[in-house]
């Protein structure tokens, strides 16, 4: 079954709350799976890159224009959540377990700007 990006985006928009529940990887993985692609269930968001690649996602070169369905894997920052963060872009907004104001989910991430990779399935 091919990936239905629109179904994934609809799922993440519908299930995202107004604030973080600290379950970004679960919500983003479930949205991708709602679009028809299976991902391994990994404990930490920061470690989802390999699972995304096994499912046919490819890393997007830095500076590329974002498109709906892109997934960001963000590494942790010192004194922040050691699990990192996972989020999906709907074409205008980033979603995980909540509707985000930017790709970085909170002030600690926005201030430290830790490393991240963007993945895309064509």
Image (cartoon, rainbow, N blue to C red):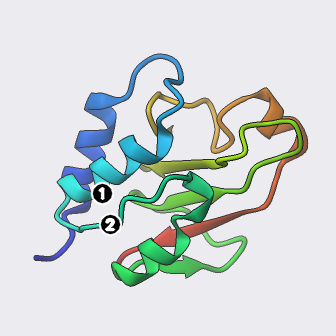
Asked whether 112 or 62 is in front, the reply is 112
Q: Residues within 10 Å of mark 1 (few under 14, many from 20)?
A: many
Residue at x 79% of width, y 28% of height: 107
Q: Quadrant of residue 78 in the image?
A: top right
Which residue sits furthest left?
Answer: 1
**x%, y% of residue 7?**
18, 51
Which residue sits furthest top?
Answer: 18
Say which mark, if any, is on residue 94. Answer: none
**x%, y% of residue 61?**
66, 80
Are the two marked residues, 2 and 1, in contact with CB atoms closer than 8 angstroms? yes
In this picture, is 1 found above or below 66? below
Give the mark toward the camera: 2 or 1.
Answer: 2
In this picture, is 87 found above or below 35? above
In this picture, is 103 found above or below 57? above
Residue at x 36% of width, y 53% of height: 29
Residue at the spot of label 1? 32
Q: Quadrant of residue 15 in the image?
A: top left
Q: Is residue 92 visible?
A: no
Q: Secondary structure at mark 2?
A: loop
Q: Is residue 73 left or right of residue 2?
A: right
Say which mark, if any, is on residue 39. Answer: 2
Q: Sequence-wise, which precedes: disc 2 or disc 1?
A: 1
Looking at the rendering, in which quadrant would you find the C terminus?
bottom left
């Amino acid at each position: 079954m091919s990936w239905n990006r629109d179904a994934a985006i609809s799922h993440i928009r519908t299930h995202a709350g107004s604030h973080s529940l600290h379950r970004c990887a679960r919500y983003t993985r479930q949205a991708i799976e709602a679009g028809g692609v299976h991902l391994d269930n990994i404990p930490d968001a920061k470690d989802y890159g390999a699972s995304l690649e096994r499912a046919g996602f490819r890393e997007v070169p830095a500076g590329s224009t974002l498109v709906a369905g892109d997934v960001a894997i963000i590494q942790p920052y010192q004194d922040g959540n050691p699990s990192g963060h996972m989020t999906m872009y709907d074409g205008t907004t980033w979603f995980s377990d909540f509707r985000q104001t930017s790709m970085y989910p909170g002030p600690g991430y926005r201030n430290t700007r830790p490393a991240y990779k963007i993945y895309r399935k064509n």
